[in-house]
Amino acid sequence: MENVFDAKDAQNYINRINNLVEDTHGLWGRMTVDQMLAHCCITYEMVYEPEKHKKPGTIAKFILKTFVKSKVVGDKAYPRDSPTAPQFVITGRRNFDDEKKRLIGFIQKTQQLGASAFHEKESFSFGKLTSDEWNNMFAKHLNHHLSQFGV
């Protein structure tokens, strides 16, 4: 798996994003390319702009940590057409260029902060994660959706 904290790997993601155009169609799923970019930004918003999102309650967080965490932060890739958590659903169209710039900015910021900034950092939904778990979460999500759109 790529390392989002590595400059070369981060640039690879950026290059893949830059290969997208406004009318790129997904190979599966229902999202448009602008919705996919906005959807990918949500993971980063929960880190850098947490005020935009409602934190899960105690029971929901317990369920997420117990049943979902290992699928999200583990090494195994997401299968096609995996279910999407409600807070990640994007309705309506978004500005392609704006979402592209936002996602690239989040990737750059994450890489520049480095793995040490994420070691034992509290996740919105899963509690404290190791930098490897953060990497898996970011990298798997990006790979899944960039592959969905053929880049």
Image: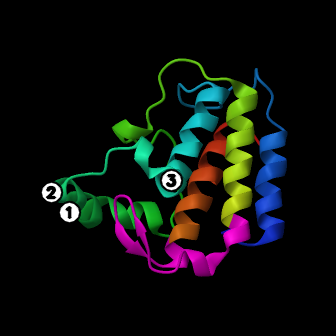
Helix, strand or loop status at disc 1: helix
Helix, strand or loop status at disc 2: helix
The image shows residue 53 at horizontal and vertical percentages of 39, 44
User: Is 123 inside the magenta-drawn segment?
Assistant: yes
User: Is 25 inside the magenta-drawn segment?
Assistant: no
Q: CA distance from mark 2 to mark 3?
A: 25 Å
- Residue beneath label 1, please? 62
Q: Amino acid at mark 1?
A: Phe
Q: Amino acid at mark 2?
A: Ile
Mark 3: few, some, or many residues within 10 Å (few <14, many ≥20)?
some
Q: CA distance from mark 3 to mark 1?
A: 22 Å
Q: How many marks?
A: 3
Q: Nearer the viewer, residue 129 or 3?
A: 129
The image shows residue 63 at horizontal and vertical percentages of 21, 58
Q: Residue at x 76, y 29 (%)?
A: 97
Q: Which residues are magenta?
A: 111-133
- Residue beneath label 2, please? 59
- Residue beneath label 3, please? 78
Q: CA distance from mark 1 to mark 2?
A: 5 Å
Helix, strand or loop status at disc 3: loop
Do callouts 2 and 3 mark residues in contact (Cβ within 8 Å)? no
Do callouts 1 and 2 mark residues in contact (Cβ within 8 Å)? yes
Mark 2: few, some, or many residues within 10 Å (few <14, many ≥20)?
few
